[in-house]
Image (cartoon, rainbow, N blue to C red):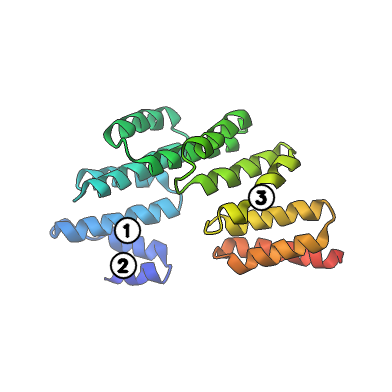
Amino acid sequence: KLAEIYYHKNRMETALENFLAVGRKDPLLYLTARRYAAEIYFKQKNYVAAIPVYSELAENAATAKEKEAFQARRIVSLIRLGQIKNAAAEITAFKKKYPKAINNVALFTVELGNHYRLQKNFKKAIKLFKRVLKKYGKSGYADDADYFLAVTFITLNKVKEAFAILSKFYSNHNGSNRLSAALNTLGNLYFRSEKYDNAIAMFKNALQVNKDQSLKANILSNLIKAYTQT
């Protein structure tokens, strides 16, 4: 209970310390604490610590759905660590075990695409993002694929292709958690083209839908720059 209080107050280090102190005497309570611990590790990008906890949770999952979710988080952690061969082997096994888990397969494909994007293997990244849009367009990760595809095009200075994606992002993915980032990026494209009024509109729209405090400062900074130009 003390750990949960710290968790909801966003004091993650103290929460984690208390969750890790929960012993095995009550198995249900122990596994609940382990679930919180795994989530904190994952949020902190401490994937080395998260992976064995997700393995433990998967082994002790109460339902098949929970087991699938924990195994999926383990695979994402492996990808983000750059352990692509291990992740690929687990993805193959995952597909055989859960042939209907299209959403998670789409997630893995996006994560792999993002891995290659960060490694500057843009050709492979684009191929993977396009695969998500073509094969898993109805999944919950089509918006992520579209957003990262646009970002990749911007990196490659293919502004026309990026603009085509981002200008339709609101109509195609209006409920996306990437919406504020997409609008902010679109605003930057307008800013580069010296279309400051359009940039201001995009930055203001991005602020309206934004739920990410770390992104808010960047959007505000961009809005101030655009106002300065006008």
Count the marks: 3
Circles 1 and 2 in contact, beta carbons < 8 Å = yes
Q: Quadrant of residue 145?
A: top right
Q: Mark 1 — residue?
A: 36
Q: Dot 2, crowdedness within 10 Å: few (<14), some or many (≥20)?
A: many
* Mark 1 vs mark 3, CA separation in Å: 35 Å
Q: Work out whether mark 1 precedes mark 2 in sequence or the reverse, and give the earlier one.
A: 2
42 or 3, which lies in front? 42
In percent of width and height, residue 228 lies at 84, 67
Which circle, 1 or 3, is nearer the viewer? 3
Residue 137 visible in this rendered orientation of the protein: yes
Which residue lies at the image location 14% right of the left edge and 60% below the top edge? 26
**Residue at the location (81% across, 51% down)?**
192
The residue identified by callout 3 is 166
- How far apart in space, not on screen, are marks 1 and 2 (Cα)? 9 Å
Q: Amino acid at mark 2?
A: Ala
Give the foreground label among 1 and 2.
1
**What's the residue type where badge 1 is placed?**
Tyr
Residue 156: x percent and y percent? 71, 36
